[in-house]
Amino acid sequence: MMQPLVASLFEDLRKRMPGIRLRVFEGFSGQIERWIAEGHVDLGLLSRYRAAVPGKDDVLLRSPLMLVRAADSPRLPGRVEFARLAKLPLVLPSVPNGLRVLLEEAARKRGVSLNVVLEADSLNAQKDVVRRCRCYTVLTAQAIFEEQATGKMCSSAITKPELFRLAVLTTSQQRPLSRAGREVLRTIHQLVGRLIEQGVW
């Protein structure tokens, strides 16, 4: 969700509140949660593949997980049953990544084994291998919105079961949010609402 959110956030705040200085860090959800717990960052935008934490998580978006492929890979129907993933070469993050744990649990429940040909804890690396090596991965539409818009990647909804990712905002418990932090939080909510209305997400 970093794109296009960060550029829009920076652009909006620079116009309205130029005194706010943003520092943006990118990482997987576990790393972001550590930064939040240690007070290294004030706000974290992260993924949850389980229920949100009451009183802590502010759910921005609930997105279905999609099977993602390069546009020039063999065609797939618009909806793909989860069991079919066992027959495809998958590029996934390593355990204990929340997405990987969710997929492995779903596979165990259905008595199938996932064919993970590469573990990559970098979203850009996952997408690059999928584009160049005719592999597949599992992501949300937000993670590939640019590639889908330019016709480089395609996706199919995963069914039986449908799996979801929650995008949540969480804040540091180390100290209260400053006025600037509260303004950034409010602006993120507005921008996400706008992106949803525009059909980007």
Image (tube, helix red, strand yellow):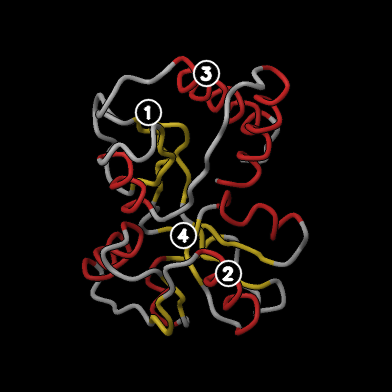
Residue 61 x %, y %:
47, 36
Report the Cα–Cα distance between label 4 and label 1.
Answer: 25 Å
Q: Between disc 1 and disc 2, whose residue precedes?
A: 1
Residue 122 x %, y %:
48, 67
Q: Between disc 1 and disc 3, whose residue precedes?
A: 1
Q: Label 3: which residue?
A: 183
**Residue drawn at x 67%, y 22% as measured from the top left:** 18
Q: Between disc 2 and disc 4, whose residue precedes?
A: 2
Does residue 180 sit above or below 152 in this rendering?
A: above
Point out the image quarter for the C terminus. top right
Dot 3: element: helix
Mark number, residue 175: none
The residue nearer to you, when weighing 4 against 182, is 182
**Residue drawn at x 55%, y 46% as measured from the top left:** 1
Three-letter code for the amino acid on which mark 1 is drawn: Asp
Dot 4: element: strand
Mark number, residue 158: 4
